[in-house]
Image (spheres, rainbow, N blue to C red):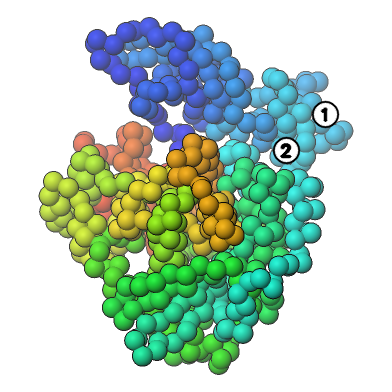
Amino acid sequence: MPSNSRAPKPVSNDPAAPTHVTAVTGRISVHPRGFGFLNIEDRDGESAFVTPPDLNKLLEGDRIEARVVETQPGRFTAQGLRLLERSRTALFGSVTRRGVRTFLRVDRVVANTDWLLEDLPPGTADGTAVVARIDGDRARFERAVAPTEASIERVLVRHGIRGEFPAECVTQAKRARRIAGVARRRDLRDVPTVTIDSVETRDIDDALAVLPAQDDGAVRVLVSIADVDAAVPEGSDLDLEARRRGTSVYLVGRVIPMLPPELSEAAASLVPGKDRLALTVELRIAPEGEVVSVDVAETVIRSHARLTYDQVAAYLDEGRADGIAPEVLSCLRWLRTAAARLSVVRAARGGTTALFREEASVRLDADTREPTGIVARAETSAHRLVERLMVATNEAVASWLIDRGLPALHRVHDQPDRERLATLSELARNSGFEPGFGATLTPRGLAAFEAQFRGTSVEPAMRTAMLGVLGPARYSAEPRPHFGLAAARYLHFTSPIRRYADLVVHRAVKRFLAGTRGATTADPALEALAVEINRAAYAARRAEIERLQMVAARWLAPRIGERFRGNVVATKSFGVVVQLEGMGVTGTIASEGLPPGGLPLGVPLDVKLVRVDEELGRIDLERA
């Protein structure tokens, strides 16, 4: 369900607080029922109610100046709203006519009223889904949207995600098809190298190779990452567009790439049999699992095999090598050795894998694009192998940069405070576990708790709930620890095709390799960039979740009245959120349907599906 359907925290009702606040600024949050809230800046989540008439012509995210008045004891209303800044440039909605005038019925998560629609092509039928450009207080037609794409387009416009690329970016991407500068690079094209991805993946940005152990027992793993910077000059139109996007967005039925497909799926993608420029990190992993040395180099590589997670898992777990070339089997065995060694060290220092939540896998009909099934995607031994190697690479590069005093975008995750720790303890007890965390939570304590529910039927729901309690990681120019991974130093380096933060790190590495010195870690512009990318990543994640919920609502629509098993994974002001077992999607039980005192976090229960709303991605449940 869209996050803006929940009521924000009201302005403080401290009797000592003033009842009138002038020249308050904040952002508008639109509720689908027609009212809204003004989320006040610099007030730690405080907000004031906005009546429907005052909300007219304002949009979700608009920056507003207003007065806040205490209309009832403890209840605050924003009055005299004045628009300071629009948050968006486009609107999604459907055509509706009233007499001789044509309006756009705007997505109700974005606006509570219809907008006058101009420049509509003659003959456009009522109900046609369209995208319009905002022009003052009017909407100007830009393009019609096919019915099969309406749900995706709604999500993109709702979150300000750019779908199409400007023509100049596509032109620059096409020019990048030829690779240059091979002679000065370390040539690894003859080293057996593989990629391991989902079967549907086309933007392949990491490849793996390994040199078997010698007399000292150390294994040398070569993690090669696509050198996107070689094709995307810093400051170019292509680079600026990638920065604005911040990340690729993976929606059910469509990928919105950070870079044009001509680059992300072709010239930069590490497809088999093609020479590709890369940055390669060599990790020397001792028998005890410690990374004893790290080397970083600009390279040219050639993938010898494009493998899928299922193929690799079948070989590692059962010895079945269906579709795998014999010459890379030894590579897979040694990669398993390296990943196992890394796992020992990871387990010893603690942390959790709950940050990688259970995802839903949706099957769509190839012709109609209608959902035909939703199941939770299972993690395999191949997923764990790749994850161990990628995390180790990210940690190694973080240390490599910090040791040289180089600036970078780091990935940080805060240790939970007392309030979050109390919530996590409540989750554990309600789910049938005894945490006994003590006054503070350490990474090892978290790992010990995770070991209690690993392999149980409630594990998927527990992981989702834990992710909500622990909170998300974020980018920062300050090299602080990553609590969830129990990593003192961590960043993102391994996906520059998909994440702009990785591209920034690549450039820092390449500048040093080219001999540039004198960079400073105290760069305010880098922290501003971190804030910008965090905002883009948050919008992308919301869009991905909402699109999934929309598809799930459509798939569940014929199953109204059926019963499901689930677990409470979040408590909200409007009720509780329940994750449905075996599906990876959530529904909500409204507050009025809860027993006195509500339902505690983590509790399992049987629920009945009572209604769905595809536009809002809402799945309404009640206790069965």
The quarter of the picture where residue 121 lies is top right
Relative to residue 315, is residue 366 depicted above or below? above
- Residue 374 in percent (x, y) is at 49, 62
Query: Depth check: 364 or 547 in front?
Result: 547
Q: Residue 378 carries which label?
A: none
Tell whether 609 sits left or right of 193: left
Residue named by callout 1: 119
Position in image of residue 3 (x %, y %): 45, 38
Which secondary structure, mark 2?
A: strand
Quarter of the figure with residue 75: top left
**Amino acid type for the residue under numbered disc 1:** Asp
The spot of residue 201 in percent (x, y) is 60, 67
Query: Which residue is pictured at 43% across the width and 73% down the height?
Result: 283
Residue 311 to residue 79: above or below: below
* Residue, disc 2: 130
Q: Is mark 1 on a helix, strand or loop?
A: loop
Tell me if 290 is positioned left or right of 449 in this view. right
Q: Residue furthest bottom?
A: 326
At a point 36% along the width and 56% down the height, the residue shown is: 489
Q: Which residue is drawn at 21% across and 60% down?
A: 444
Question: Could you say where residue 46 lies in the image, as x and y percent from the top left?
Answer: 37, 23
Residue 551, visible in the rendered structure: no
Q: What residue type is labelled 2?
A: Val
